[in-house]
Image: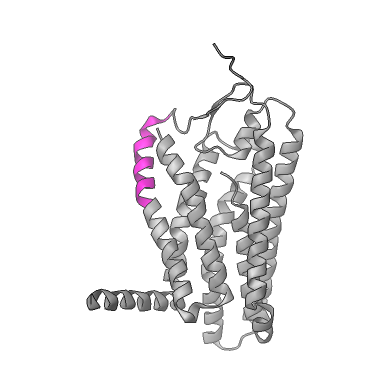
Amino acid sequence: MPLINESCPEEFTLLGFADRPWLELPLFTSLLITYPIAMMGNITIILVSRLDSRLHSPMYFFLANLSFLDMCYTTSIVPQMLVNLGSSKKTIKCLLLALMSFDRYVAICRPLHYTFIMNQRICILLVSTVWLIGITYAVSEATATLRLPLCGLNKLDHLLCEIPVLIKNACGEKGSNELTLSVVCIFMLAVPLCLILASYASIGHAVFKIKSSEGRKKAFGTCSSHLIVVLLFYGPGISMYLQPPSSISRDQPKFMALFYGVVTPTLNPFIYTLRNQDVKGALCHLVRRISALSDSW
């Protein structure tokens, strides 16, 4: 009989809400409904931002990247949740939100320099840097975490195989992993939030200097959708991570994973569509084009 290495289990059992089995069917049904909606909504945002020439601007280039990231993140966790019902940190998204706030800052506070600062080359460079940083962190942190000895422990009290959960279950020397995770979270969560707040402080100051009420309304309209997304992402995160660890309930991280992995990717397309006249116009134009093509067939 071959020996089994107890320090490195070949598979994990995700406990999820095993102590509350009555939650499993409602959660499964909700995920089965929201996942296609999230995918369709984000695909639509990407299509209209690429097919409509009026949306060929840095703002919608960043928005298309955000939608693509939401699709990737949701696809990487929701099928796993559906299978296990019964992640990784969104570090790239934090940085993308910071880029979007910088774009709004330049558009409102430096309008004469906007086309020079936010040219296509700079936008591609910024987005490529964000993706490279996020992927590098994810690969390096996951590799270092998976090398930790787990001493045969293969039950994780979570919905996903998240890095913090794996570190918590490790039984070897994990101080360096915890320190690295904390430093990276500060850099990729706190720093982008500070940049976003600084950008919008400058934007608010500039907007209140606009004498025309119509001008102020238009300026606020271009930023409101992004602000709502920022609040949806950072609000729950701050309420959780600023709490003392002892006050965080057992199921709180599970609900946060559901919120970030399902709720925000589903709501984001609707927020940007319903509160943005340009996107609504582009969407109507796309629908008319599709209808005309179907009629011609």
Q: Is residue 16 magenta?
A: no
Q: Which residues are magenta?
A: 20-34
Q: In this rendering, would 25 be left or right of 184?
A: left
Quadrant that contains the N terminus:
top right
x then y, percent, for residue 175: 75, 34
Image-quadrant location for residue 95: bottom right
x then y, percent, for residue 216: 56, 82
Q: Is residue 29 magenta?
A: yes
Q: Residue at x 55, y 40 (%)?
A: 253
Q: Main secondary structure of the magenta part?
A: helix
Identify the residue at the far front of this view: 1
Answer above or below: position of 276 versus 20.
below
Quadrant that contains the C terminus:
bottom left
The residue lying toward the viewer, choosing from 292 and 78, is: 292
Task: Give the tally of numbered discs.
Answer: 0
Q: Residue at x 63, y 53 (%)?
A: 91
